[in-house]
Amino acid sequence: MSEKKDIRALTKTELREFFVSEGDKAFRGNQVYEWLWSKSAHSFEDMTNISLETRKMLEDNFVINHIKVDHMQRSSDGTVKNAVKLHDGLIVESVLIPTESRTTACVSSQVGCSLDCNFCATARLKKMRNLNPDEIFDQVAAINQESLLYYNHKLSNIVFMGMGEPLMNYNNVLKAIEKITSPEGLGISPRRITVSTSGLPKMIKKLADDEVKFNLAVSLHSAIDEVRSEIMPFSKAFPLKDLKESLEYWYAKTESRVTYEYVVWKGINDSKEAINALVKFCKYIPCKVNLIEYNPIDDGDFQQANQQAISDYISILEMNDIIVNVRRSRGKDIDAACGQLANKKS
């Protein structure tokens, strides 16, 4: 017997055509599509306005490869971290980050990661596969439900800053965002979505050419090539001059400001030279800098810089009219560094 097809791999048109081929009305495809995406149905049994006979026929022909929240941790600061089990048993992570005014979903795009950022727990998990669009969508839908349950309002923002490099799963990430933003999906504005990349110049240019409407963030961490390649060895193949050129191309096409994600580590990028290099890099296009408090993954080389170094970054960036925000670490009591929980569960 042939393996059943995942029904969410079908477009609405294909669903309509399937029902017509089965001697049913085309609009039945619309109903099923709504259940799959707007209502995020986990099974055909959930589709209560469709006859039992039709549900049985769907069961015989298709599967819904829905994710399952295998393990959940809730922090004392309100952060919720999910270890998400996929249909093939692999684990990824997603996080709900609340503030007073909003809730943000941090979602994964790959199982593991093929990049080798030395400070990242996910890099210790070899890349197993890309996530499908529906698996990315499901993470967002699940966190939206948690936001409603714990905070009594819908999810307000989404960041692709979980496991994996989103631009190395380009097509599936864009298809997922299309579903997330569609009125037939979750209806979340693309302006409330940020895709974070480690800095792949060719793919940043492709985003610009595809005229995406979401926000772009780049994990920069140093504006000095030698230092950056120590932190993120893969970046030797993508020097800062290439990254700069791609970001100038991005801004010329989209007129959308870039966010630089930047962790300051003791003895690595906490010098005045490092700060001045960042200031220079920030002058190329309109941008803002998020200084991120580091969640150590062990007692190794990467340790949080002292407060004076952070203060120096803030004062010098602000002196140069560069917007800077400090992102305090959340969920320290629940394996909050990306990849920590999946490492435990794998």
Image (cartoon, rainbow, N blue to C red):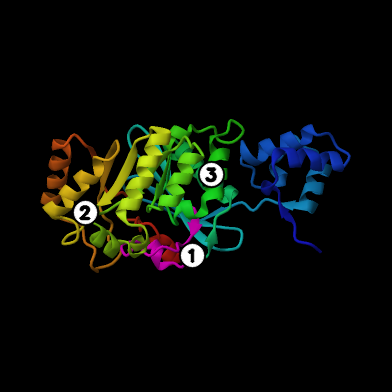
Q: Is residue 48 visible?
A: no
Residue 113 drawn in magenta: yes
Residue that carries the numbered disc 3 in the rendered image: 174
Residue 78 in picture, x, y percent from top left: 35, 44
Q: Is residue 276 above or below residue 27?
A: below
Residue 242 in picture, x, y percent from top left: 35, 52
Dot placed on the residue nearer the N-terminal end, 2 or 3: 3
Q: CA distance from mark 2 to mark 3?
A: 31 Å
Quadrant of the rendered image containing residue 130: bottom right
- Mark 2 vs mark 3: give the one in front: 3
Dot placed on the residue nearer the N-terminal end, 1 or 3: 1
Left or right: 228 as drawn, with respect to 67: left
Q: CA distance from mark 1 to mark 3?
A: 20 Å
Residue that carries the numbered disc 1 in the rendered image: 127
Q: Nearer the viewer, residue 189 or 36?
A: 189
- Mark 1 vs mark 3: give the one in front: 3
Which amino acid type is marked by label 1? Answer: Lys
